[in-house]
């Protein structure tokens, strides 16, 4: 068995890259693990979010912005080729605040971000309570809500459909996707690689490690030390309701199908994706504080997923120096970044060299000499 590129991991990151590579004419084989693996792609909120991202690493703002801009094209292309309507909405998003002090802190933070990115025209506004009510005409806001930051380019997508459409798109473009194929070994073979899974093996000129929390061990085999850790996020899901939130509100977002998700938490609990009563209580209280009518709504589910976090929270995209042709891609906003992964990142991997656009994301930024 052989392929031009083997992509390890068929979550949102691996699927988006493989879809992009297959579209450029590469013979792609995607190998995905077991049903019981940790899979962030099945547990997220589906936000395609921009405003507030990139503090300390302006390149991350540019990457997210590029993806947000490319998303409509990706969505249309997938709808045409696979028939999946991704239910993409990009009409803005709100982050509500409960005091004037919080509003001022947010304004200062977003202004600093604009200075760092050199952006002259802000893609956000601070708006008062009355302006929030105009955007959410069917919502009685909690009495403490004083206003919001309003991201003009934010939005949401049905992320399960996005995942299925990307996977269908890989096959549509001539690629192959295999499940229940946990990769154990990645080894140099001539100018390429030999990749072992179970009793089988495949040879490939390039390998892309996009296996979420499973990436660390695989990356080490090609000389890349990726410092990732799990971060648990819990969410509550409500019954379906008539649409009352026309745009996503951070913390309480209604999907186009009517369900509303409340969340999420950010917990450092290792590889534990169980749910807790304390999280359900605090998330419920937060939702009622923002929108009191949430107290009348039935909850139908609670779930937890594990984010893939680096020490600074930003992605790692890198090609191994000791094993050229081996790439790694991990991040915690794989929904938002899907269009950048299927577009510019796939372009770079196809060409065999990450462009300078991706330099700030190399994992060498974590190689700080240890103090004696
Ligand atoms: C609660 C929560 C909310 C979130 N909300 C958002 C959001 O609103 N917007 C946003 O942009 N992002 C969000 N995210 C993040 C987003 O879900 C992830 O960034 C994205 O799903 C990561 O995808 P991935 O492909 O890297 O990893 P995963 O989805 O975890 O996939 C990794 C895949 O690799 C496979 N694998 C692992 N090891 C091996 C191996 N050895 N061999 C073969 N296959 C292997 C696994 O089986 C799995 O299928 C959220 C995450 C969480 C947890």
Image (spheres, rainbow, N blue to C red):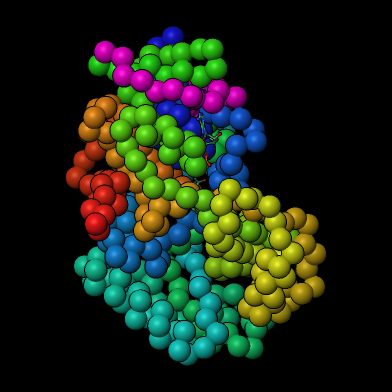
Q: Position of residue 330 (x, y in %)?
A: 41, 44
Residue 312, quarter of the rendered image: bottom left
In the rendering, at what x and y percent does residue 282 appear? Answer: 67, 72
x, y percent for residue 86: 55, 45
Q: In the rendered view, would you say 168 is above or below 129?
A: above
Q: Residue furthest front?
A: 372
Q: Quadrant of the N terminus?
A: top left
User: Can see residue 89?
Assistant: no
- Residue situated in front as seen by the camera: 88 or 2: 2
Give the percent coordinates (x, y) of residue 249.
Answer: 56, 68
Residue plotted at (74% across, 64% down)? 277
- Residue lying at the far left of the rendered structure: 356
Instruction: Write the residue at 46% across / 18% down.
Output: 196
Q: Is 21 placed above or below 119 here?
A: above
Q: Residue at x 48, y 41 (%)?
A: 212
Can the viewer see residue 285 in this picture?
yes
In magenta segment, residue 177: yes
Q: Quadrant of residue 118?
A: bottom left
Q: Please state the total of marks drawn on the protein image.
A: 0
- Magenta range: 169-190
Side of 310 where 319 appears, left or right: left
Return the residue found at the far top.
Answer: 1
Residue located at (53% from left, 55% from top): 231
Q: From the viewer's perspective, is residue 310 above or below residue 209?
A: below
Residue 235 among those drawn in magenta: no
Q: Quadrant of the C terminus?
A: bottom left
């Amino acid at each position: 068995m052989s392929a031009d590129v083997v992509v390890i991991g068929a979550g949102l990151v691996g699927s988006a890259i493989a879809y992009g590579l297959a579209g450029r004419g590469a013979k792609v084989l995607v190998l995905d693990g077991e049903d019981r693996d940790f899979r962030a792609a099945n547990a997220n909120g589906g936000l395609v979010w921009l405003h507030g991202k990139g503090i300390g690493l302006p390149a991350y703002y540019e990457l997210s912005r590029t993806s947000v801009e490319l998303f409509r094209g990706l969505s249309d292309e997938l709808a045409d080729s696979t028939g999946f309507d991704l239910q993409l909405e990009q009409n803005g998003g709100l982050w509500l605040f409960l005091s004037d002090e919080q509003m001022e802190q947010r304004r200062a933070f977003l202004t600093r971000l604009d200075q760092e990115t050199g952006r002259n025209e802000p893609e956000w506004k601070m708006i008062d309570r009355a302006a929030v009510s105009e955007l959410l005409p069917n919502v009685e806001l909690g009495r403490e809500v004083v206003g919001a930051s309003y991201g003009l380019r934010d939005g949401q997508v049905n992320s399960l459909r996005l995942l299925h459409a990307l996977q269908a798109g890989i096959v549509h473009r001539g690629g192959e996707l295999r499940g229940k194929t946990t990769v154990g070994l990645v080894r140099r073979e001539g100018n390429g690689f030999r990749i072992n899974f179970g009793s089988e093996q495949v040879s490939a000129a390039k390998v892309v490690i996009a296996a979420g929390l499973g990436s660390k061990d695989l990356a080490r085999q090609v000389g890349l030390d990726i410092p990732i850790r799990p971060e648990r996020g819990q969410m509550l899901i409500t019954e379906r309701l008539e649409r009352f939130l026309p745009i996503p509100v951070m913390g309480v977002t209604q999907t186009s199908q009517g369900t509303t998700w409340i969340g999420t938490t950010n917990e450092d609990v290792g590889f534990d994706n169980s749910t807790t009563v304390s999280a359900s209580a605090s998330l419920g209280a937060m939702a009622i504080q923002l929108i009191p009518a949430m107290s009348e709504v039935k909850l139908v589910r609670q779930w937890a997923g594990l984010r893939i976090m680096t020490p600074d929270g930003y992605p790692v995209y890198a090609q191994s120096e000791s094993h050229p042709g081996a790439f790694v891609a991990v991040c915690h906003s794989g929904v938002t970044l899907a269009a950048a992964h299927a577009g510019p990142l796939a372009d770079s991997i196809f060409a065999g060299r990450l462009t300078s656009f991706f330099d700030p994301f190399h994992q060498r930024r974590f190689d700080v000499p240890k103090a004696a």
